[in-house]
Amino acid sequence: MSDTVMNRPAAASLDEQSIRAFGERLRGQLIRPGGGEYEQARLVWNGMIDRRPALIARCADTADVVEAVNFARDHGLLVAVRGGGHNVAGHATSDGGIVIDLSPMREVEVDPERRIVRAGGGALWADVDAATQAYGLAAPGGLVSDTGIAGLTLGGGLGWLRRKHGLSCDNLIGAEVVTADGRVVYTSENENFDLLWGLRGGGGNFGVVTRFEFMLHPVGPEVMAAIVFYPVESAREALRGFRDYTATAPDEVGALTFFGTIPAAEAYPAELHGRRYLAVGAPYIGPIEEAERALQPLRELAEPMLDLSGPVPFVELQKMFDEDYPAHTMRYYWKSAFLPGLDDAAIDELIELNERRPSAHSTLDIWHLGGAIARSGPDNSAFTTRHYLYMVAPESNWEHPEEDEDNIAWTREVVKQMEREAQGKRYYNFPGLNEEDDSDIEATFDEVYGRLVALKNKYDPANLFRLNQNIKPKA
Ligand code: FAD
């Protein structure tokens, strides 16, 4: 199908009668411009994204998703699929197209005996964490509880459990998927495994996932976490210490270090408001008694200005950063670069780049990878950047449109300077505004790119699902 046909505005190509009939077939809701709920329903998390889809199909169940996919395909509509709506590039909406919105599909079902959870395609991590922690179990998710399980898992999924239990996508063991031809396909390790392989890191390219099935692991319910803020003046010493610590850290420690500025919030002592810092956040996923000893070095990287370390319920840890990322009001632009190691030169460059950080709301994050992430490989998933030891992620967050240019430029500068030998390789859950061209997608997927194209040809040859890290089918 050509671009022109796919991008054709819905309003121009649809007659009122077909739209009405479609709405009546849905068990959920069809929301249209002018309707009372439209202005709220069209919003996504990133306040930079201001788009007006022609139709928002709020799906109640898998049958609704089938209706919506068939309708979109038959009428040549540009399709956006919405899970939690948190994609930074705003992939979950478009101008003039249809949004297949799974937000009502948030049911979660735990099988504690088999250590499995099944969750609807619109569920958020908060839904999954609450249900699974009732049994002292957890599926590896992200660091913020109101992100969707769908987008995060399909793009990989980095969270506190990553080094002990792998990426979210590594723990995906089954899925129900509505494909571009409107079929409902079940995939697992024993059935249609090619599709499961592609869902593990290959993004939303292959269909709409209506149900996710994850492996669970015993976690908590309380875990010990090191949360320490060092003055930015000690960043060199603290970052070198962080590098040396992570060289031998056990897999139980999922550590992250980040530059930022203490906000004027009650949670922080008033005398620290506005101070620049390098912080460390690191839970120990194991017995509390072992945790204290294992995490102690992270609390002594330099002289801390604030140490909030201690035992914390795992569900609370999962919400620790929620308030830092308000929906709809702030503007966001996040990207990434992978590093095999953190040498002294890279540390000095990070310090210098942080000095030029334009917004006090932004952070410059360094994720420690390795552990279980590095023990999997291309036979299991389409996620290819798993052998790097660190990921640098500039997260630019700001308030006003007139600040767009400076913040976007700084974020790109960080990536350009830090990507080194991992040129063009990206973590697509931090996609900027999706401005990457096909060469970056090829560079990132590298040795599995051909296999992904073949999968796209098989499940979506007309590229119906294209608002994503798009794998283009071969004609
Ligand atoms: P949506 O915008 O709803 O969806 C994103 C894309 O995923 C869609 O465009 C579509 O292509 C696809 N998609 C969504 N639902 C479906 C479905 N049911 N079937 C098929 N395709 C679908 N990432 C991490 O790895 N670790 C983190 O700790 C982390 N923290 C974050 C914190 C915040 C505040 C935010 C905003 C993002 C964070 N991310 C993190 C990035 C996150 O993984 C991506 O933004 C992800 O796309 C969010 O998924 P979603 O379902 O909410 O997004």
Image (tube, rainbow, N blue to C red):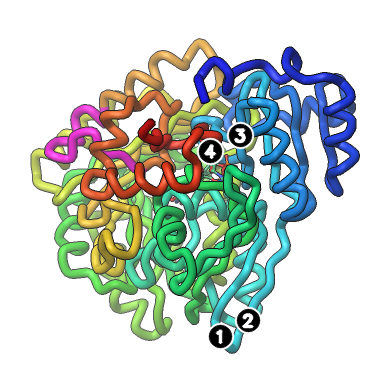
Task: Please name which of the two marks, 3 or 4, marks the residue nearer to the observer.
Answer: 3
Say left or right for 360 vs 290. right
Measuring from the top left, give residue 388's x and y in whole percent. 21, 53
Of mark 3 and mark 4, the one earlier in the sequence is: 3
**Distance of label 4 from label 2 (alpha carbons):** 29 Å
Q: Earlier in the sequence, mark 4 or mark 2?
A: 4
Which tag, 3 or 1, sits closer to the chain's start? 3
State which quadrant residue 24 falls in: top right
Q: Work out whether residue 296 or residue 402 is closer to the camera in this orientation and state it.
A: 402
Quarter of the figure with residue 387: bottom left
Quick check: 468 above or below 133? above
- The reply to whether residue 43 is visible in this rendering is yes
Q: Is residue 423 highlighted in magenta?
A: yes
User: Which is closer to the viewer, label 2 or label 3?
Assistant: 3
Tell me the CA gap for discs 4 and 1: 32 Å
Does the CB distance between marks 2 and 1 fall below 8 Å? yes
Q: Residue 111's mark? A: 2
Q: Which residues are magenta?
A: 414-427
Amino acid residing under circle 1: Arg
Residue of label 3: 80
View extreme (front): residue: 475
Residue that appears at 85% across and 31% down = 37
List the residue tagged with mark 4: 87
Q: Which dot marks residue 114?
A: 1
Specify the farthest residue to the bottom: 113
Q: CA distance from mark 2 to mark 3?
A: 32 Å
Distance between mark 2 and mark 1 Cα atoms: 6 Å
